[in-house]
């Protein structure tokens, strides 16, 4: 028997996923990872590949277990937008394309970056579906 909070596979389990301190860990991790890649030698394709690989590898684990608050989603999306256009946190750059276009699928003419709110909800729905279809899955 254990008590809350505890760390499981790098994820802090507290029982209250809406508290922002849990999500600030994700934000800080992504900021640290992205800040190391603020290089002028990358093309837009390079920025796009880094965005997809960093966000999918860091935040997907948190998004698959907890519903992210709206302020965290907007913070993550602003990080994506600022990083994609080469801006830094203290200096703004001109955004030439709206984030909605960046998040469109490639088939629709967009760049294929995931919408984080829908991605989060779909990962949580996947758990619900699995529990309903496979009774002994947990």
Image: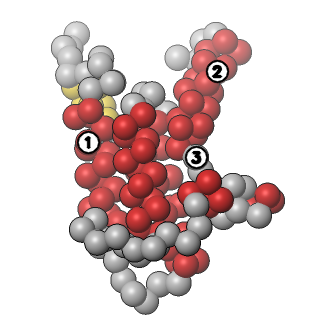
Query: Measuring 58% from the left and 61% from the top, which residue is drawn there?
Result: 98
Q: Which residue is painted at 59% across and 37% down in the image?
A: 118
Q: Nearer the viewer, mark 2 or mark 1?
A: 1
User: Tag 3's secondary structure?
Assistant: loop
Instruction: Report the coloring of the rendering.
Output: secondary structure
The answer to which of marks 2 and 1 sits earlier in the sequence is 1
**Which of the two residues, 135 or 50, is positioned nearer the viewer here?**
50
Q: For marks 2 and 1, give the CA distance.
A: 29 Å
Q: Is residue 128 above or below residue 119?
A: above
Q: Residues within 10 Å of mark 2 (few under 14, many from 20)?
A: few
Marks 3 and 1, how far apart in space?
19 Å
Residue 52 seen from this side = yes
Which element type, helix, strand or loop, lies under badge 1? helix
- Give x and y (percent) for residue 114: 59, 50
Tell me the residue that label 3 is attached to.
Answer: 115
Badge 3 or badge 1: first in the primary sequence: 1
Q: Identify the residue at image location x=57%, y=30%.
A: 121
Q: Position of residue 126 (x, y in %)?
A: 62, 27
The answer to whether residue 2 is above or below residue 31 is above
Q: In the rendered view, does 99 fall on the left or right side of 75?
A: right
Q: Quadrant of the N terminus?
A: top left
For disc 3, the neighbor class at 10 Å (few under 14, some 14 to 19, many from 20) is some
Which label sits in the foreground, 2 or 3? 3
Where does label 1 land, which residue? Answer: 24
Q: Decide: is 84 above or below 31.
A: below
Residue 130 - label: 2
């Amino acid at each position: 028997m254990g008590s809350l909070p505890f760390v499981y596979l790098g994820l802090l389990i507290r029982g209250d996923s809406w508290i922002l301190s849990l999500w600030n860990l994700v934000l800080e991790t992504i900021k640290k990872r992205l800040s190391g890649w603020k290089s002028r030698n990358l093309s837009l394709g390079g920025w796009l590949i880094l965005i997809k690989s960093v966000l999918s590898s860091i935040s997907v684990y948190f998004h698959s277990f907890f519903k992210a608050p709206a302020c965290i989603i907007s913070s993550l999306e602003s990080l994506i937008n600022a990083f994609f256009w080469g801006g830094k946190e203290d200096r703004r750059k001109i955004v030439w394309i709206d984030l909605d276009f960046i998040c469109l699928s490639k088939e629709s003419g967009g760049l294929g970056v995931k919408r984080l709110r829908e991605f989060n909800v779909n990962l949580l729905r996947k758990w619900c579906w699995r529990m309903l279809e496979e009774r002994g899955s947990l």
